[in-house]
Amino acid sequence: MNLYMYMLGFLILTSCRSHENVSVEHIISDEIVTITRAPNNKKLDSVCLNVPLEFKLNISSDIKYLSIDNIIDNHYLSTPSDVVIYDKLENKPIFDFKEYLTMNKPFTIIIRERNHLISKNYAIELLKKYNISNSIEHFKLGDTIKLVSYKEFRKENPLFLSDLEKVGDTILITTRKKEEEIYKPKKIKINW
């Protein structure tokens, strides 16, 4: 009977331990919010506002596969045409997470949506607000206007960010353990 109770206690304790494959911490980034020309907008009635999202990830050592996708405004964004994921430390795009699976230490990523459109008029308001003399009238593809850090932008533009919050944007982290065939998705709400 005692052996049975010990085994039952062991099973309960081991089944209650954390099975978290990836821990994610959303960080209010100090990266710069930028404005770029919308690639498919010949009229220039809107431009792209590039808001950096920063996440610190810690991956357990038994993970074999990791992917990160964005769901913005209820649309799945494909990498890299709609969104780019950067390694913050290396300042380089990440197309494959294989090298990060063997690091055994946390790393930080920056996610930048490439096609978040804002009106030309709102862009002009932002330029005036931050005393930036650049004009978007003759904006060329590849031109970038730096505004302020996301931390500052967040404080000074609460209405814009509250509109983004209403949509319920998420990142989708999919993992697979080394000895398993099942892929496990985990949605994480973006707190703009």
Image (cartoon, rainbow, N blue to C red):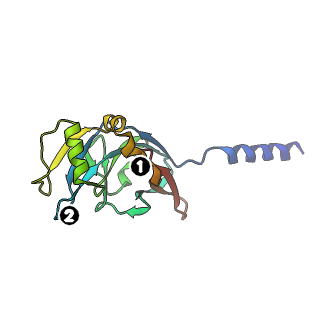
Please state which of residues 96 and 151 is positioned toward the viewer in this rendering: 151
Q: Position of residue 16 (x, y in %)?
A: 68, 45
- The quarter holding residue 113 reads bottom left
Q: Considering the image in quadrants, where does the N terminus appear?
A: top right
Q: CA distance from mark 1 to mark 2?
A: 23 Å
Q: Considering the image in quadrants, where does the C terminus appear?
A: top left
Q: Left of 93 or right of it: where is 137?
A: left
The three-letter code of the residue at mark 2 reads Asn
Please state which of residues 87 and 135 is positioned toward the viewer in this rendering: 135
Please state which of residues 137 and 151 is positioned toward the viewer in this rendering: 137
Crowd rating for badge 1 (residues with CA inside 10 Å; few <14, some 14–19, many 20+): few
Q: Left of 179 or right of it: where is 98?
A: left
Q: Is residue 123 visible?
A: yes
Which residue appears at 50% of the width and 54% of the height? 187
Residue assigned mark 2:
41
Q: Is residue 54 visible?
A: no
Residue assigned mark 1:
163
Please state which of residues 126 and 179 is positioned toward the viewer in this rendering: 126
Which residue appears at 52% of the width and 62% of the height? 183
Crowd rating for badge 2 (residues with CA inside 10 Å; few <14, some 14–19, many 20+): few
